[in-house]
Image (cartoon, rainbow, N blue to C red):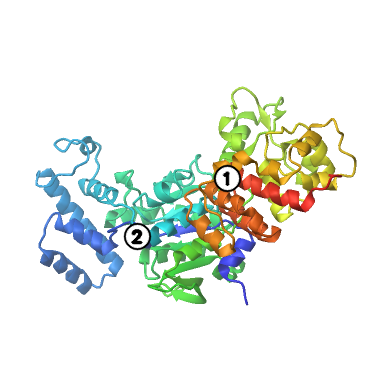
Amino acid sequence: MPKSILDKIVEKRKMPVLFIGSGISKRYLYGFPDWEGLLRDSFKSVNPDPYYYNRYVEQFKREGNSPFEINTKLATIIENDFNAAFYARKIKIKIGNTKNPKWVDQGVSPYKMFLVSYFKKLKVNSDPLLLQEIESFRLLKNKILAVITTNYDTFIESEILRDDYQVFCHQNELFSADSYNIAEIYKIHGSVLDAKSLVITEKDYADFNSSRKLIIAKMLTLFAESPIIFMGYSFTDENIQHIIEDFLNCLTVKELSIIGNHFVFISYKKGEKRLLETKRTIFTSNKIEIPITEITTDNYGAIYEKLNNIIPGIAASRVRETRKIIKQIVDQNITNESAESVIVDIDDLDNIDLSTKPLAIAIGYRDSILNKVGYGILDVDSIIEDILFDNKKLNADNMCFDRFKSISSTHLIPVFKYAKGCTVPIPSSSKLNDYINARNSIDKIISKSQLKSINALPTASTIDELHTAMNSQNSFDKKAGVLLKSIGNFTIDEIRTECQSLFREISGTKITSTCFKRCVMYIDFKENYTKKS
């Protein structure tokens, strides 16, 4: 059976760029309007008679305007009428001082403030199936390179990415000094957090189109590293068609030949639980061909679960902070001859003080750096990954005599794989030997106090029962706790598979779950412990 496009993305470990349209907010925010619905609601606030609205629509149709052009013309009329009514004190907007709001003096359009108020009132849909999808969507925050969106609302940054990504809502910010091309959200039509940034009228779109090349340049930068997945858009969206056309015009013949594997459109089909994948070519209003891979479904949770199998080396937000630190180092020390080498843990980037110590960066082959700088810098998460996937090719001697030379008996770290592979005896006076003696039985890995702490969690005796019990938990540690409590009922291969799945779920973030660490230590003990080791 051929691999799906999503499986190929996962296999290449390429974090995708999500290009998100209103269909996503409409799916998850209760009462979210489409563009026409928004305009009708806006028009009603000025003139409740629907005949006036329909008269404009018919007029613009007779003039030969496209649906996109009709909407921008309607938005222009509505803004003019709304603002006139506001300044005549016929309409109030409940933001700030309703009598003399400060934003009026700042030159903000009253109609755009109305839109801010409109979108801020929308709440997340309480449908249990959609809430479950949202939970799966949130797990992707460490698997996404960046987000481009035309949505005004803050659903993505507040509900999904939870403020871990930097938000830019003006086109001129796309290549600012604060942009690092990762862990960022580009709200190219503006945001309700800045009413002035909203793009909706003819003039707004004219200004937008005049600087659209900045968006294209950003897409080219991101495309060099990642596929682009379009979600919540219609093929007929004229504005997106123009952006894609401009983007394709910048690609080489070679890049165009593989664009179908890098442009993925998720198309909504009500009730469809499968992920129906097809290669197809869509045509824009200008008869431009766009080769894409289309996935048709109503099962967005399955999309998120597929993408959640991506295992990045470092979370996107940490990569962004790393790039930021590197830029600061280069900016501050480009002429400094006294820079020192300093080892910095990836989770301590926020605590670096560049003002007191110049830094130098070591770049080279990983094994060479480990051998020269020392295995002592290897983080626990990498060791856990090596136990689960056997993919780090770590030198057992170096691990035992460098990484574990100062190991504390209170730490939760799997060591038996490396002790077993060590080519020289581990000294009886060493801290590693003490640690091995402190963890040389199942009871010492899963202590009575640990079992007591997870006593309220359910026990499972089959894989189906295990999955049901784990999925009912509201935290990662409790999911791992269910597995830990039931661990004696499953084979090592079954436990490894579950731990691998859990690892993928939080890949890129620092592992703090003691239950999960003990599960991995259980695997390590069962597979590698001998009295010799």
Q: How many marks?
A: 2
Q: CA distance from mark 2 to mark 1?
A: 29 Å
Image x and y of residue 76, in percent: 22, 56
Q: Report the disc number at residue 509.
A: 1
Labelled pair 2, 1 in contact (Cβ < 8 Å)? no
Residue extending farthest right: 424
Q: State the residue in front, 400 or 441.
A: 441
Which-is-in-front pick, marks 2 and 1? 2
Image x and y of residue 8, in percent: 61, 66
- Answer whether residue 465 is visible to the viewer in this image: yes
Image x and y of residue 466, in percent: 56, 59
| Residue at the image position 24 percent from the left and 59 percent from the top | 38
| Residue at the image position 37 percent from the left and 70 percent from the top | 236
Specify few, some or many for label 2: CA neighbours under 10 Å numbering under 14, 14-19, or 20 or more: few
Mark 2 or mark 1: which comes first in sequence? Answer: 2
Q: Report the disc number at residue 31.
A: none
Q: Is residue 235 left or right of residue 7?
A: left
Is label 1 in a helix, a strand or a loop?
A: loop
Name the residue beneath numbered marker 2: 127
Quarter of the image that includes the N terminus: bottom right
**Given the image, on which type of amino acid does mark 1 rest?**
Thr
- Residue 458's place in the image compared with 397, above or below, is below
